[in-house]
Image (cartoon, rainbow, N blue to C red):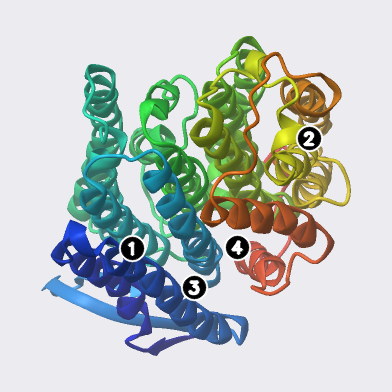
């Protein structure tokens, strides 16, 4: 059930308004400038909580931004799937915004006004992606997200940053072009591309060539930001950006827009029945399974902490893609929970990496001997997040992995269950040695560092704690589990054939 409301448009406009206020505030009044971001983040979260109340009651608030022509609207709708992503982004913006103030001041970064304005605009586009009612609206905000995050990737304006920014744009805008091609094709075919559980393409009479062509365009378009191999190389290159940007890219906005887009393509564009009939699920499952393993092994090779975390992200994003591709309600629930769990867990790891850099200017794993004794809160949170990444109970990624593995078994794909187990071992292999170095070894230098600015330490501690709390009580306080189960129930209202069955 949908209800007309101005709340969805308010959710998109609040971060954009915050960006305007940030841009209009001079550098001399930097406390006021930085306060605008925090105020906007809290206001956005409040609006999302109001939308959550409706979503949990089975009502999706919607609004039309613009009617391009009869039947073609730019419209927003806060359905359960969109609320999972939108709530995650809005909640993490609160802590990442506060963290970014401490980081940017600690590093004495240049052009901070531009940075915080672009940061807020990126959140505005992210919320637009989350709440997009149809493919056209999704593409609009998906492309705006690429443009708004480019100044963040290239922020330092070094040669390396400029090259990374260009590579980032080349990949992400190319993905957007694929989506635009799909939207144009659908319009020519006369198909209404409004997202709906079970897929707006299910029941159409397209021939096989059209089905596979649209699948290639849609899955390829979102697969770039989801960093499914071989479309992933922009992500490690983007690590030249300031650490708050890395956290934004990996936990809040860009890559989550990619995997959320994949959920939309699988469950709300094609639908399980059509993908099963086509056999297209095997393509997604094969590519994502390969990405999970290969990226994990590449993470083991990197001494640079941020690049190791980048390959970890590439691996865990494909957990979500694989969960969606398995075409089962339990696996889809696990995929959505993993999106949330990975967001809060990975942002903790990047927050810790940034705090270490600000205090010590150390960037490599081999330099971190004894750092846990000097930065116990930071590395304690890093240890909690590492346990979560490895799927250790009762952390949040243990909960999502249980559902993903259970979902694989539900559809008769036990091989992917073993893959999830193996990947957890690899996650431990590239993260646990960092924790051991930090706490069990003696420092190789005699400097005394201490914790970073409290504006950095408090967000690190909070997200580390939530990586544990959301494992024990995934509905506390934002209803993520209930939302995920609601999405799965809508997409799979009745039993369908399992992915491994013969249709």
Question: Residue 502's mark?
Answer: none
Q: Is residue 164 above or below residue 52?
A: above
Horizontally, residue 165 falls left or right of residue 251, namely left
Q: Residue furthest left?
A: 69
Q: How many angstroms separate mark 4 from mark 2 (CA)?
A: 29 Å
Q: How many angstroms separate mark 2 from mark 1 (CA)?
A: 35 Å
Of circles 4 and 3, the one toward us is: 3
Residue 16, horizontal then vertical, whole percent: 25, 67
Q: How many angstroms separate mark 3 from mark 2 (CA)?
A: 31 Å
Q: Nearer the viewer, residue 382 or 331?
A: 382
- Answer with mark 3 or mark 2, whichever residue precedes in sequence: 3
Question: Residue 491's mark?
Answer: 4
Residue 130, horizontal then vertical, whole percent: 42, 62
Label 1 residue SS = helix
Name the residue at 72% across, 21% down. 430
Labels 2 and 1 touching (C-beta < 8 A): no
Q: How many angstroms separate mark 1 from mark 4 (CA)?
A: 41 Å
Question: Residue 390's mark?
Answer: 2
**Residue at image mark 3:** 79
Label 2 residue SS = loop
- Answer with mark 4 or mark 2, whichever residue precedes in sequence: 2
């Amino acid at each position: 059930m949908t209800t007309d409301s101005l709340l969805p448009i308010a959710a998109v406009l609040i971060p954009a308004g915050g960006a305007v206020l940030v841009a209009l505030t001079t550098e001399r009044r930097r406390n006021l400038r930085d306060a605008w971001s925090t105020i906007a983040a809290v206001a956005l979260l409040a609006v999302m909580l109001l939308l959550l109340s409706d979503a949990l009651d089975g009502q999706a608030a919607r609004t039309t931004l613009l009617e391009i022509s009869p039947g073609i609207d730019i419209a927003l709708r806060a359905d359960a799937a969109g609320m999972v992503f939108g709530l995650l982004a809005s909640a993490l913006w609160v802590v990442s915004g506060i963290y970014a103030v401490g980081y940017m001041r600690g590093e004495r970064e240049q052009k901070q006004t531009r940075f915080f304005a672009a940061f807020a605009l990126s959140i505005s586009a992210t919320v637009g992606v989350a709440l997009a009612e149809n493919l056209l609206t999704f593409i609009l905000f998906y492309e705006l997200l690429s443009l708004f995050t480019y100044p963040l990737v290239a922020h330092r304006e070094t040669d390396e940053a400029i090259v990374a920014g260009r590579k980032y744009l080349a990949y992400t805008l190319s993905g957007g072009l694929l989506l635009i091609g799909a939207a144009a094709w659908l319009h020519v075919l006369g198909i209404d591309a409004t997202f709906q559980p079970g897929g707006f393409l299910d029941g159409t009479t397209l021939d096989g060539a059209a089905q596979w062509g649209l699948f290639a365009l849609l899955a390829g378009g979102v697969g770039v930001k989801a960093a499914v191999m071989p479309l992933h190389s922009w992500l490690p290159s983007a690590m030249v950006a300031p650490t708050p940007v890395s956290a934004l890219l990996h936990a809040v906005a860009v890559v989550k827009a990619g995997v959320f887009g994949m959920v939309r393509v699988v469950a709300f564009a094609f639908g399980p029945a059509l993908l099963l009939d086509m056999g297209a699920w095997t393509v997604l499952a094969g590519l994502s399974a390969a990405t999970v393993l290969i990226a994990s092994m590449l993470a083991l090779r990197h001494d640079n902490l941020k690049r190791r975390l980048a390959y970890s992200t590439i691996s865990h994003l494909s957990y979500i893609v694989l969960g969606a591709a398995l075409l089962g309600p339990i696996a889809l629930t696990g995929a959505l929970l993993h999106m949330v769990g990975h967001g809060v867990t990975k942002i903790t790891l990047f927050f810790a990496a940034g705090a270490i850099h600000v205090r010590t200017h150390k960037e490599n794993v081999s330099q971190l001997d004894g750092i846990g004794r000097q930065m116990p809160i930071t590395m304690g949170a890093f240890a909690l997040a590492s346990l979560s990444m490895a799927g250790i109970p009762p952390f949040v990624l243990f909960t999502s992995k249980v559902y993903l593995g259970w979902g694989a078994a539900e559809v008769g794909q036990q091989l992917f269950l073993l893959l999830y187990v193996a990947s957890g071992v690899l996650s431990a292999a590239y993260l646990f040695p960092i924790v051991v170095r930090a706490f069990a070894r003696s420092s190789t230098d005699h400097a005394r560092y201490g914790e970073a600015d409290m504006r950095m330490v408090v967000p690190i501690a909070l997200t580390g704690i939530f990586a544990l709390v959301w494992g024990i009580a995934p509905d506390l306080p934002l209803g993520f589990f209930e939302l995920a189960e609601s999405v799965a129930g809508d997409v799979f209202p009745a039993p369908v054939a399992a992915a491994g069955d013969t249709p």
